[in-house]
Amino acid sequence: MSGEQSTQQDPRRITARQILGKWPVWVFPSVLVTLVSFVLSLVYTGGIADPQGSMRHLPIALINHDTGPWGKQFVQAVATAPDPGRRVSWRIMSPAAAKDAFDSGRVYGGIDVPRDFSSSLQAIISTPARAAAATGVRHPQVTLLTNPGAGSLASSLATGVEQQALRVSSQKVGADLKAQLRATGAQPTPAQLMLLGNPIASTTAPGHRIGARTGLGLTAFYLTLLVVLSGFLGANIVSNSVDAALGYAPSELGPKRRMRSPLLINRTQTLVIKMVMSAALSMVTSSAIVLATAVIIRLDLPHLLQLWVFAVCASAVVGISAQTIVAAFGGLGQVISMFFFVALSIPSAGATVPLEALPGFYRVLALFEPMRQIGGGTRAIIYFDARADAGLQRAWIMLGVGLAVALVLGFGITRFYDKRGYHRVHPDHIQSPRS
């Protein structure tokens, strides 16, 4: 009998049909994949379902350059308008304070009242002669300011709020002017009535300018995503490669499979190897990211050296933290890492949808999720001149906290496993290291 016939008739050989017919084989992957898909659907769509309905305390500045009575009255009317849902946080600021707030990303938009605001309004009802020629009197014009560095949706939401507030306040100012005109005994002309129906016009301008090649304020988010993914995926690749080199997992490349004999090394020393490799490789991956985005794509990336240093540190912290999770939970740790660093992190990053327009659950996540912290630092470096109060200081602090937590938990858990004798492979199957 030939070797091929002998192999085919080997009673130990089983087929795919036999395995697929056993229901226990299906249970774990089916439940896990279904649960992951269900939770991911909830997490991603829950954050973007209704930004306007979820909006709370959107920061918008009110700047009054006018020295007359109407500028102050207009600003107060906007700031004190009924807002039962507390959707907006109006902030009356001096021009200098407003510029500082725009330059640090603390406000998403603003309404700027010009110096001639009161005089332009008063000109509509000033004298009979002027009233007769009211069609020649121009509308006073305020400027609706945007902050592209805060993100395109944040600016869009701010502009929508500003336009609505302007419309309501303009009608109120027009009614007050008509009452003032009638109080003198005069009757508004048709031209005056037309002007006073909505006397305040507007134009839109950026309150803080960013570079042309910045993706309308989205490049910071995508760079953050690259940094986080390089740290997370790099940690998984390093973990699998180290396990294969130590003989605790097979190494497969195409049809070739190799399984080394396991080496005598404990969990703590294994974690040291993986963490050091993840930290070292973060320099390589971050350099590749900067090379691709700054040199080849030519994005507007000021403070390039500082951005590179920040990306290296952020990627290293993500990689070290991912190694801690895998060391604690084993193979399931990769799924947990995916949820922590990607699934829950992206919708709570406040990049595509600002935090103030997210449901409360995501705002809580943003307190500690890494992408929010890293994104704040990246945005500050790229759009806001690397200012500490634009989010960079908080980013560095949270990276330090994250690193400390990862090291304490990682080595605490692995030392506990080692002391309790939770070996990855039984010592009887371990041989001495080979050259």
Image (cartoon, rainbow, N blue to C red):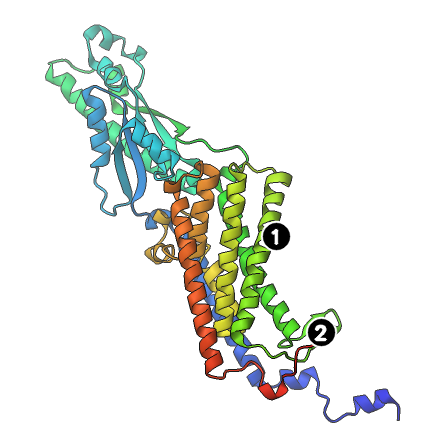
Give the class, few, some or many, for how many residues have Cα within 10 Å of label 2's Cα (few <14, many ≥20). Answer: few
Relative to 126, is 60 on the left or the right? right
In percent of width and height, residue 90 lies at 27, 38
Q: Residue at x 48, y 67 (%)?
A: 324
Residue 379 vs 43, above or below: the answer is: above
Between disc 2 and disc 1, the foreground one is 2
Labels 2 and 1: the sequence-earlier one:
1
Most foreground residue, 398 or 33: 398
Q: Residue at x 61, y 52 (%)?
A: 284
Q: Is residue 351 above or below residue 62?
A: below
Residue that label 2 marks: 435
**As rendered, which of 389 and 171 lies closer to the eye?**
389
Q: Position of residue 378 (x, y in %)?
A: 47, 45
Give the camera-side residue of 388 and 174.
388
- State the SS at label 2: loop
Q: Are marks 2 and 1 in contact (CB under 8 Å)?
A: no
What amino acid type is highlighted by mark number 2?
Answer: Ser
Compute the Cα span from label 2 to label 1.
Answer: 28 Å
Instruction: Mark 1: give few (<14), some (14-19) or many (20+) Cα within 10 Å.
Output: few
Residue type highlighted by circle 1? Val
Q: Residue furthest top?
A: 129
Q: Which mark is residue 139?
A: none
Query: What quarter of the picture does the N terminus occupy?
Result: bottom right
**Which of the 4 quarters of the picture holds residue 366?**
bottom left
- The residue identified by callout 1 is 284
Query: Circle 1 sits in a helix, a strand or a loop, which is it?
Result: helix
The C terminus: image quadrant: bottom right
Q: Is residue 136 above or below residue 323?
A: above
Identify the residue at image location x=54%, y=67%: 272
Residue 397 visible in the displayed image: yes
Residue 97's x, y, as percent? 30, 31
User: Would you say residue 189 is visible in this rendering?
Assistant: no
